[in-house]
Amino acid sequence: MSNLLFVLVGSWLLGGLFVNRQVTQQKATRWAVASAAVTTVMTAGVLVFVWQRGPLVAELAGRVSLAADVESLLLATLTGLVTTTVLAAGARRELTRSVMARLLVVAGATLLVFFASDLVTLAAGWTAGIALLSGSDEASRRFAGRLLLTSALPLCAAVVWIGAVGGRLDLRGLEEGTLPAQTTTWVMLLIVVASAARMGIPPFHRAWVRLLDAGDGARAIAVVGPLTGAYALLRLGPPLSQAFVADQPWLEAWALTAAMYLAVVAFGQRKQLRLAGYLVASQIALVFLALCSSEEVAVHGGLTLWLALGPALTGFLLTAQAIRSRRGPVDIVRHHGLVNQAPLLAGLAFVFGMASVGLPLTLTFVAEDIIAQGLLVPHPWLAAGFVAVTALNAINMLRHYGRVYLGATPRVRCPDLSGRERVTLVALAALILVAGLAPQLALTAEADTAHHLHAAETSR
Amino acid sequence: MLEHIDGVALAVAILAPALATLAIAALMVTGRAREENVVAISRTAFLASLAGAIAIAVVVVQDGPREITTGVWFEAGHHAFHVNFLLDPLAAMMIVLTAGACSLIGHFSVTYLHGERGHTRFYLLLDLFAVGMLLIVTAGSIDLLFVGWEIVGITSALLIGFFHERPMPVRNGLRAFVTYRCCDVALLVGIIMLHHYAHETGMHVDPGRWAAGLPAVSGGGATVVGLALMLGAMGKSAQAPVGGWLPRAMEGPTPSSAIFYGALSVHAGVYLLIRAQPVFERSPIASAALIVVGAITAVTATLTGRVESDVKTTLAYATMTQVGLMFVELGLHLPTVASVHLVGNAVLRCWQLLRAPAILHELHEVHGALEHELETGRVLDNIERKLPGHVGAWLYLRALDRFYFEALFDRFLVRPFFALARALARLDEGLGTSDTPVAVPRRAATDGGKR
């Protein structure tokens, strides 16, 4: 049973190789979607198993070992969901055979990060996941290059440093605290930088926004959907330095300033995809803020927001990308009135957009409520800033919706969603609403992680 | 037998429009939304909801107030979101008013919006609004009230922008949403502070009171919570200086104007403040603030309303005036008076707004029957004549400018904010290759709602 973890990672990698060998685009698409969907369902099955029976540990030839608990399998399922949705509902023009294959392999590398039981595997998955994002076009090459420099390099440097000073490279060994205190602080700083860069926290956000603006939505979503960047902070932070977050209040200030900055800059954009990019980055910065806080309830909310934003932002970015593929770049200086030509696209864009910023009865609303509850009393200014950012983002989201979808019907035709897009996105919207109506499942799943994280952060 | 009726009736009252919303959404997704189907679904749902509301009122009148606990929506750490409902005389009155008004508007709109392009969308939003409003008036905790509050806010903004082919309704819808959202920040802070000070946010029946209220908080906590709740209520109830969205909201279709800004939504803030009376009774500062805000709104709105030439805008200002007076009543700790005032104003304004499109026609009919024109506004004209000439002229000019509330917001908040956003966007992109100019809102703040 434990080898299932290797099966899941392998399934993504094999899927990618198989799709790359298909002769026609149509066949490649079919195989890519089927492979992603089957692997996602398998991952969900393993999640249920682990939930009931406890964590899994798997070894391959006595060298590589993987481990998975509820948290890592939740994130693996989220990765599968995001990848499947992108492959099924992404713009066909953008999803060439090679891009689809790369997305599947990137998902496999992401799972390697989530299931890693040692630092080398984690760094390998982390770096591979970034390197494989690079494609034949300039925008993706530049994006992957920058991310390798700002995210993979610091993480690899941290791993090498730990190895060089004689620390153990398996995650369990880290908890034993064999590193000198001074080294630990610097290693933690490298990990925080690696995480922030991969999450697109300022000043590392521009490359991601440019990638999205260049029309490379699939790769952009592959980065933000599962929010792999936060994982290093989550997994390595507590065992390495138990009091790091509590000792570094500037982390919270950085996260809040980043979220606020991105929210305000989003108002200064005139291109739809750039605005969407800044909005998404601002919401992601709120996850960073909650994870950096030393309050258990806020951390719990942050973990839930992480789960909630994945599907919502994926849907939102896919609808934005759908318009670009139909109409080309859209400015938001004037109203475009797409709702009459594409009512379903408009309706779903509204649901995804508002679900990304805390529409009532969605999981994002629940998560933001919990974060605010957790922050207000111990950190009133942080909480006030948090609530202000959520308000700004909600206002800008509705403004964006008004500009793109409302207004006089344009002369240029904009077809509504195709059958494939319709089925995928309606299912995703239904999932978002169901998760919002019954949020306790997600909250229960995250409770242990939040408690563990908080206990580690506050123990000295 | 009545023991179980309340829960069933409440479920019917709230779930009927909720299911109608889902059904209409499903019809829209599958492309099968026909006018007659949508109307049939909504009418049935509203009638069921009204029946449930009447049953609740009967139960409450016969057996007294009760609390219904359905469980916990979610919990994390020490924070739990309880889904509790409270049925007391105030809730019973409001639930009948809400369900009744929604049924009436649903029925009225069948012919009024017949053949309109957004017919299905209107009913979808009306059903969703009914869910939000029913949650507000039956909520047993302020947490649940906030959920309904947010639903009402979003449906309100979308219905203001109903005629979206013109830019002005869309812009005005966004303006209302901006006001709601900013004031909701204060409301959320108030709710969390209430959690902190009182360790709960449930509303409880007090035998000495007509309406159940929030837990009492004393000292500085009462002032903080009271002021935060007041700010939240000011947004929804269009009080000065943030009430400029209400006249603009009249861009929406008449039935939605009637139910949102005549009958229900605009009174949601008053309802919240009635529930929060135990907090205000312990804070003279918060009570005084309520009186000041209400009085300023009442005076400025009544003067502004008198210089407006559009009937719906005039009615909007009349509503603001009356709601301002309700704020004063609540500041004077007269919740029963405010409740009666609320229901009376809601019914009257709803009726007036529904009649507004036909008022010229009716007036001509009356003139024809009387064979001479009616003399109107004589009492008010006499008051104006009693004012010194320069005072009257000064007030007239200020009223034309809507007492500069919107212009000041525009100049000192909106424009600087967008200037900052543009500057940061330029900085972010690297000087010289900026993504600006940005879509700055036109001088929406000063060009009037209907004008």
Image (cartoon, rainbow, N blue to C red):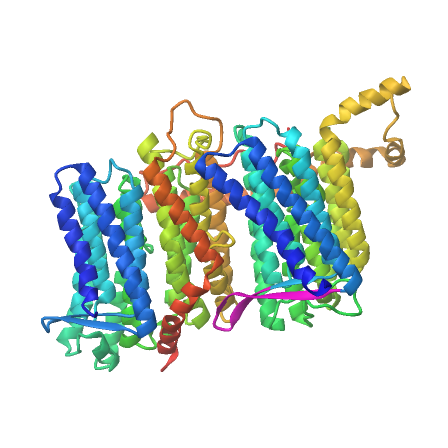
**Residue occupying the point 63% across, 33% down:** B253
- Name the image quarter holding residue A65: bottom left
Residue B239, horizontal then vertical, whole percent: 69, 48
Locate the C terminus of chain B and report the quarter of the image it occupies: top right
Does B305 sit above or below residue B93? above
Locate the N terminus of chain B and report the quarter of the image it occupies: bottom right
- Name the image quarter holding residue A419: top left
- On the question of residue B280 being in view, the answer is no
Residue B76 on the magenta span: yes
Q: Nearer the viewer, residue B350 or A394?
A: B350
**Residue occupying the point 67% across, 51% down:** B268
- On the question of residue A425 being in view, the answer is yes
User: Looking at the image, which residue sits at the far left?
Assistant: A61
Residue B189, horizontal then vertical, whole percent: 57, 61
Left or right relative to B159: residue A3: left
Does A296 sit above or below residue B148? below
**Residue occupying the point 59% across, 63% down:** B191
Left or right relative to B361: residue B203: left
| Numbered disc total | 0
User: Looking at the image, which residue sits at the far front?
Assistant: B1
**Residue occupying the point 66% across, 51% down:** B234
The overriding secondary structure of the stretch rendered in magenta is strand
Residue B74 on the magenta span: yes
Per the rendered image, the range of residues in magenta is B65-83
Left or right relative to A325: residue A302: right
Q: Nearer the viewer, residue B270 or B449?
A: B270
Residue B363, horizontal then vertical, whole percent: 81, 24
Residue A2, horizontal then vertical, whole percent: 21, 70
